[in-house]
Amino acid sequence: MTDLLEKAFEHASKLPPQQQDALAKWLLNEIAADNAWDATFAKSPALLASLASEALHEKDGGDAQPLVPDEL
């Protein structure tokens, strides 16, 4: 375990049990979601390569737009 994660768990252990459980559920869900994305990407490397190539082509052609999260 890294020092930072150990520090985070130390702080989390001082929270009330209900907040600890909420944090634990959130963390486990995040890990599961990351694992699901990894599995999905591993199944489709050709598709990812194609999408990356398309994005680079659009960028090089001046067709790409900057992502502005507040405008989504």
Image (spheres, helix red, strand yellow):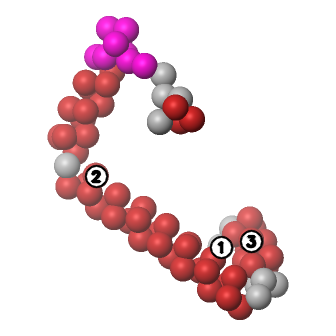
Dot 3 falls on a residue whose secondary structure is helix
Question: Residue farthest to the top?
Answer: 61
Crowding at mark 2 (Cα within 10 Å: few <14, some 14-19, many 20+): few
Q: Which residues are magenta?
A: 57-65
Which label belongs to residue 1? 1
How many angstroms separate mark 1 from mark 2 (CA)? 26 Å
- The front one of 50 and 25 is 25
Q: Mark 1: which amino acid? A: Met
Up-down: is 55 above or below 62?
A: below
- Kind of residue at disc 2: Phe
Q: Is residue 17 above or below residue 37?
A: below
Asked if the stretch drawn in magenta spans residue 46, the answer is no
Residue highlighted by disc 2: 41
Circle 2: element type: helix
Count of labels in the image: 3
The numbered dot on residue 8 is: 3
Q: Nearer the viewer, mark 1 or mark 2?
A: 2
> Camera-side residue: 72 or 28?
72
